Amino acid sequence: MLGITKIFGAVTALDRVDLEVSQGAIHAIVGENGAGKTTLMRILYGALQPDQGTIEVEGKAVRFGSSREAIASGVGMVSQHYGIIPELTCLQNLVLGAEGGLILRNRSAEARAKSLATQMGFEFEWQAEAATLSPAGAQKLEILKLLWREARVMILDEPTAMLSPADANALFESLDRLAAGGATIILVTHRLPEVLEHCQRVMVLRNGKRIAEKAVAETTGGDLAQLIVGGALERSEESSPFSPGSPLLEVSNLSVKGDRGELALKGVEFGLRSGEILGIAGVDGSGQRELFETIAGLKKPIEGSIVMLGNDARGLSTANRIAHGLRLIPEDRHAQGVVENWSLDENSALGLQRLPPFAKGGRVDGRARHQMATQIANRFNTRHGGLNLPMSSLSGGNQQRFVAARSLCLDPKLLLAFQPARGLDIKGTQQVYDGIREVCRLGSAALVVSFDLDELLEQCDRVVAMNHGRLYEPPASLAKDRDAIGRLMVGAQ
Amino acid sequence: MIWRLIAMVVGACAILVGAVLVAHQSPVESLHTLIHGSLGSPAAIAGTLREATPLLICGLAVFIALRAGLFNIGVEGQLLVGACTCAVVAIRLPGVPGMILGVVAGMVAGALWALPAGLIKAYRNGHEVITTIMLNNVAIFITSALVAGPIKDKTQADTATAYVAASSRMPWLYRTPTVEVNFSLVLGILLAIGMALWLKRTVAGYELQAVGANRVAARFAGVSPQKVTMLAMTISGALGGLAGAVQVLAYEGRFYDGFSPGYGFDALGVALLAGGSAYGVLPSSLLFGMLSKGGTALQIDGVPKGITTVVLGMLILIAAAIRYRKVTTTDA
C-alpha cells in the first residue's frame, strides 16, 4: 500500500500511509484508538475506498470495490466481531458465501474442510452447530474460512481479545505455521507482548500517520509504547496500600442456571469490601456472564444469597439496585450499553434515568442531562462530533469511553464492570481503570470481569479465577501469581 | 441513493397516472377532483376534519405502541369494542354523565381488549401482531352478533343500537346546516400534544422509548420490558377504545354493524408516516383524512375509491424508503 489517504468529512483518518508486508511474515500494526488502524485494514480488504494511494498485491496494482473482490485476489480479514451464524453447522459456516456453485456438495466439502483443519492442527465437529463453539473455536473457524477462500494475505483484528492465554498461544502457533507455509499475516493489536513475541515487523500509526516501521528484533516494548502515544507514558502512581473497609457485597453459595438450562454458577462465594477492586479472571464462558447478570438483578439465582450494600438483594429489581448505588458497565456496549440511534445526550441518562439530576420528580430534566452528557463525554475524552448526534456516529472505543464514564458519574457505591476497557488502547485503558480506582478509594468497590489476566493483575487489588461455574481464590502467598491464577482458570490446581 | 429515491417517486406517480388512465379518466382532472373534494369548500374541509379525527386518535394509539417497539394491529378491534361499550352505556345515561361515563367505558373496554395481547407478549413472548389480528376478528364478530341481538334497538329495522340522547353527545365547535366541526377534533389535538410532551419530558416516556429502541439495553438500565409492554398496550388499547367512543358520541350517535370503515387499519399508515414524533401524527392523519374525503368525491366522478388506497400505500413506501436510507448511511 502506497500513500494511502482517507478523509472522512473534516477528519483526515489516514495521511499518506505506506505499508509494505513481505510474504511469509507476521506483520503487526499498533496504535491508539482512532489512529487509523481499522480504516487502513478496511481499505486493504476492500470495505472502504481510499481517496488517494495505490494497493499492490504480489506486484500487481489492484483496486478493490468490495471485500468480495479483495478475497478473489487473496486478501481476507477476520474481524473483531465474528461473522459466524450460530444456527448453522461449522461446515455450513465455513462454506457460506463460497459455495462454488448452486448445488452443495457436502461430502467433498467436508473432506476438504478436514484436510485444511489437519494442516492447521485444528479439530472440528463439522456437523455440530456453530453455537457450540468456544470463542477460540470461532476464531479458528474464521481463519479456516479465509483458507477455504484461498486467502494469501490475512488480516486479523485483535484476534486474542477474547481468548485465554493458552488459547492465544495455540493461535499464534498456528499463525506461525501459516506464515512458514508462505501466507502473509497482518495483525492489528493493542497487546505489545504479542507483537514482541510473535511478529517479525511492526508498524506504528498515530493520528493517521505512519510513525515508524521496524523489525521487531530491533525494538522494545518501552520503545513501541512511546511511539504509540507520542511521548513518555505516564504510569499512574503505584496504588497506595489501603485497608479495605466494610463489606459492600457478600455473595454466598450462589447457584444460577444458564440460558440453556445448565448449571452456570455452582456455589459461588466471595465478598467485596469498600475500597477494593476485585478482578474475576477466567476463560470466556466460565460463568462470568451469569454472575454479572445475577448481581445486576437480571437473572434469578436458584440458590444462595446476595447481600448488596447492606440489603438482601433477593427482593430488589435492577432498578432498585441502581437506586441503592449499583452501576453497570455491560459487556456488549452495542447491545447492552447504549441505544445506538439515540443521541449522546439521550444516552447519557440510560440506566440513571430515575436518579437526580437526570430526573426531577418523574420529569426529565433536559438542561441537567445536557450538562451531565458534556461531563461524561469529557471525562475520558470521548471523541464525538456533537452531543446531539446519534451514538452510532462514535467508534467502538469512544462508545466504550462514554459508557464507562457514565457508570462513574453519579456517585457509584458498587460498580459492576464487564471488560470495562474493551477495545481501548493503553492510554484509554489506564484512564478507565484510574477512574474506577478513584471512586473505590473514596469508599466504593468494584467487581471487574476481564478475559485479559495481565490487565486484571495490573489493575485490581485482588484477583480470583472462574472455571466451569466455580470461583477459585488463589492462596494468599500466590495472590498475584500469574501462573497460579492461570492454572485456576483452566481448572488445574 | 438520491437517484433511487427519485426513481421511486417517479415510479409511484407513473403507477398512479396509469391506474387513473385505466379507469378512463384524466389524471389532471382526477387530482383536481381529489383536492377540490377534500379542501375545496368549507363543507369539504369539515368533512376532511371529520375523517381525520378518528384517524388521529387511532394513529396515536398505534404510535405509542410503536414507540415501545410493538405493532398494535388491533386498534380496529379496540375501536369496535370501545364504540359498542360506549353506546350501551351512553344510551342508558342521559346528559353529561352519560357522555363522560361512555368515554370512560369505551376506553376501559379498549384497554381490556388489548390486555391479552399485552400479557401474551410480555410474559410468553407471543408476537403481538398475531394476537392482535386474532382479537380483531373476535371483536368484529362479537360486536356484530351483539348488535344483531341483545343490544339491538327493536324499534328499527337496522342492525343498530338506539341513538344516544342529544344531551350526551359531544358538543359542536361550529355548526351550520352544511358545515360541522366537532369538539372531538380538539380532544385529538390535545392528546397528540400531551403524548409528545409525555414521551419527551417524563422518565416513564423515556423508559418506554428505551424499550422500543433497544430492549436489552433497557433491561440493563433497570427498565422492565414486561411492565413497559403492558403499559404501552394498555394505553394503546384505551386510545383505540376512545376513538370508538368519540365516533359514537360525536358523529354516529349509535353503534351499528359495519361501524368502522377500517380506521384502525388506516391508522397503521398514519403512525408509520408520522415519523418519530407524536406531532407528526397531526399532519399525517390530516393527509389520510383528505384522501379519504377526496376519494369519495372521486368515486362520484367514476374513479374507484381504491385509487386513494394506492396513493396511501405509495406514500408509506416512500416514507419507509427515506427512513431506511438514513439507517444505511449512518451504518456505513
Image (spheres, coloured by chain):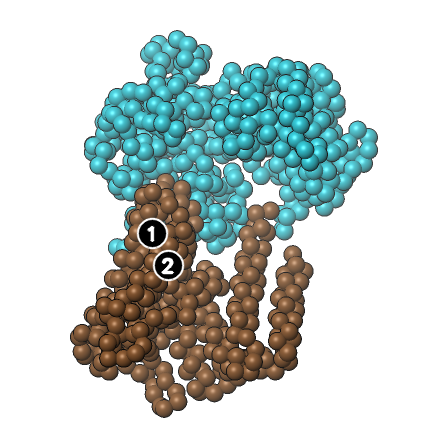
Chain colours: A cyan, B brown
Is B299 situated above or below B192? below
Q: Which mark is residue B137?
A: 2
The reply to whether residue A40 is visible in this rendering is no
Location of the C terminus of chain A (image quadrant): top left
Rendered residue at 35%/47% (across/down): B121
Q: Which corner quadrant of the image does residue A320 belong to?
A: top left
Q: Which mark is residue B94?
A: none
Location of the N terminus of chain A (image quadrant): top right
Check disc 1 and report its element: helix, strand or loop: helix
Q: Residue furthest right?
A: A60
- Label 2 neighbour load within 10 Å: few <14, some 14-19, many 20+: few
Check disc 2 and report its element: helix, strand or loop: helix
Rendered residue at 71%/22% (across/down): A183
Give the amino acid at mark 1.
Answer: Ala
Give the distance between the C-alpha atoms of the residues marked 2 and 1, in whole angstroms: 13 Å
Q: Foreground: A266 or A94?
A: A94
